[in-house]
Image: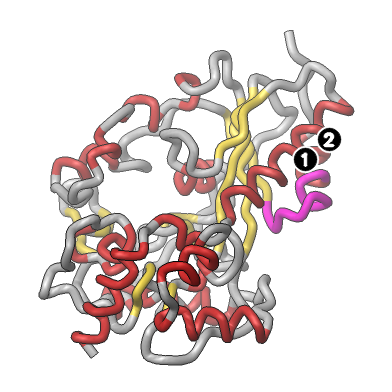
Amino acid sequence: MTTTVSAEFVKQQAAEVGFQACGIAPAAPLHSEEFPLRQWLAAGYHADMDYMQQHVDMRYDPRQLVEGARSVVSLLLAYKPDRRTEGNLRIAQYAYGDDYHQRLKDMLFQLMDRLKQRYPDFQGRPFVDTAPISDRHWAVRAGLGWIGNNTLLLNPHYGSYCFIGEIVTTSAMDRYDEPVAGSCGNCRRCVQACPNGAIVFNVESHCFMVDARSCSSYNTIENRDDSLPENVDTKGYIFGCDICQLACPYNETAPSSFSLSDDRKEAIEHLPLADETAFRHFAKHSPLNRIKYPQWQRNIAHASKNR
């Protein structure tokens, strides 16, 4: 039987590694009221992301990912930049820096190494968009925020500008966090700001959902078609979209957590003019590696036509 781990120690080590927030929840399955995935799929809001229909039960229950799982450690890395790029064509702010997947994974392994030094029998698996586990909803369980009307995790201090990772472990904790009582109240700024009406209220689940078919972020990243839907106005975004986040009052007051250098800012602003070699060089270690150069050119053409 594994040793019970100190939650305070986990959080202290997480802060030293560089995470802005850490919360811990018992690894009991999520229920449909807090994670309405099946309703979202039934409505067809996943567009052609067929992978979201796979391993549905696993997305609800982390014990199917890690046998004997007893705890889920959720961690946030804030990314709000100290300034935004200029110009008519732009990318989402989360893509300003290097690819967050490797950075978070390295930090998670560092944290696990520290925990193993104190608890030699500590076992777990780190996840950063690498398995069917719902990062946002486990962060809610762990008391790190709530699901905003834009369907993103909303942390009361850092807003929705957060990367999320977790460690699913077989260790029990001496204390678990409770979900926070926050909500968006009557605020609908993100819903009203979306140029394509992609944030829709689902009567069955009594919450807002994103219809990917109308979402600029989905269309500029996940959509592999040769052209984008004529009725989707990306408002100049050629990779991802920040519009619903920029409208959020919590994001207005959130502190900056990433310094955008002059060189990086200039490189991003000139990227729409880059040839394929330059684009691939920039995208290699960036979230932009999610798309190929033809998609990039397609997005530019679509945004330019909209403008």
Which of the 4 image quarters holds residue 68?
Answer: top right
Q: Which residue is mark 2?
A: 114
Q: Which residue is mark 1?
A: 110
- Which residue is at the far left? 230
Coordinates of residue 283 in the picture (x, y in percent): 50, 63
Q: Are marks 2 and 1 in contact (CB under 8 Å)?
A: yes
Amino acid identity at mark 1 = Gln
Front residue of this view, candidates 71 and 167: 167
- Which residue is at the far right? 118
What label does residue 15 carry, if any? none
Q: Residue at x 33, y 25 (%)?
A: 57
- The magenta-colored residue range is 13-21
Coordinates of residue 150 in the picture (x, y in percent): 35, 64
Circle 1: is it few (<14), some (14-19), or many (20+) Cα within 10 Å? some
Amino acid identity at mark 2 = Arg
Coordinates of residue 208 in the picture (x, y in percent): 27, 59
Circle 2: is it few (<14), some (14-19), or many (20+) Cα within 10 Å? some
* Colour scheme: secondary structure
Residue 21 in the figure: left or right of residue 93 = right
